[in-house]
Image (cartoon, rainbow, N blue to C red):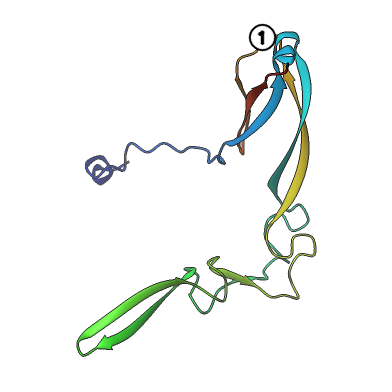
Amino acid sequence: MDIFDMFFGGGGRMARERRGKNVVHQLSVTLEDLYNGVTKKLALQKNVICEKCEGVGGKKGSVEKCPLCKGRGMQIHIQQIGPGMVQQIQTVCIECKGQGERINPKDRCESCSGAKVIREKKIIEVHVEKGEAAQSWCSTRAGNAVWVLIVRYTD
């Protein structure tokens, strides 16, 4: 840390582990289930890094910077709309679709098709303890899985 970091706000930064967003699921239970306790199954889907290409999207060295947007993912179009008037429009790059990089179709991973992630379905068993409150959660590195217990009243 140097003197400029101290004056201009660079000294107080702490390195944090990036986490995913929390996912909230509703789980319907009866009042009897809350009183006695129950185990329910919950099906979740999440994106997981492709194991075959290790999240690269293709063969090693096949990922190249997009030549159209120069790796920014955005294109800037300047259009003259009158004498002395110019309009500047920023759009998502049509070549790389905002990714900033491009993979040759021949070199793409067969498993994820160059998307770098695979949609994975996972079934979780939720144990509702006797007299449990109306909300529970499970913490993971990718974010918290929060389930809200919705009480169904029966006659």
Q: Which residue is drawn at 33% across and 77% down?
A: 88
Residues 119 and 132: in front is 132
Q: Position of residue 16 (x, y in %)?
A: 48, 37
User: The N terminus is located in which quarter?
Assistant: top left
Q: Which quadrant of the figure has residue 29?
A: top right
Q: Position of residue 10 (x, y in %)?
A: 31, 43
Q: Residue furthest left?
A: 84
**Placement of 113 over or under 32, stated as above or below:** below
In the image, taking residue 67 as reference, residue 106 lies left or right, namely right
Q: Which residue lies furthest to the bottom in this view?
A: 83
- Which residue is the site of mark 1? 131
User: The C terminus is located in which quarter?
Assistant: top right
**Placement of 136 over or under 2, stated as above or below:** above
Residues 85 and 113: in front is 85
Q: Which residue is drawn at 49% across and 68% down?
A: 73
Q: Where is residue 95 in the image (x, y as percent from the top left)?
A: 57, 76
Secondary element type, mark 1: loop
In this figure, what is the number of numbered marks?
Answer: 1
Q: Where is residue 148 in the image (x, y as percent from the top left)?
A: 61, 26
Q: How crowded is mark 1: few (under 14 residues within 10 Å), some or many (20 or more)?
A: few
Q: Which residue is drawn at 74% across and 65% down?
A: 113
In the image, taking residue 32 as reference, residue 78 lies left or right, namely left
Residues 32 and 69: in front is 32
Amino acid identity at mark 1: Gly
**Placement of 18 over or under 105, stated as above or below:** above
Q: Residue at x 77, y 39 (%)?
A: 122
Q: Which quadrant of the figure has residue 141?
A: top right
**Placement of 104 over or under 130, stated as above or below:** below
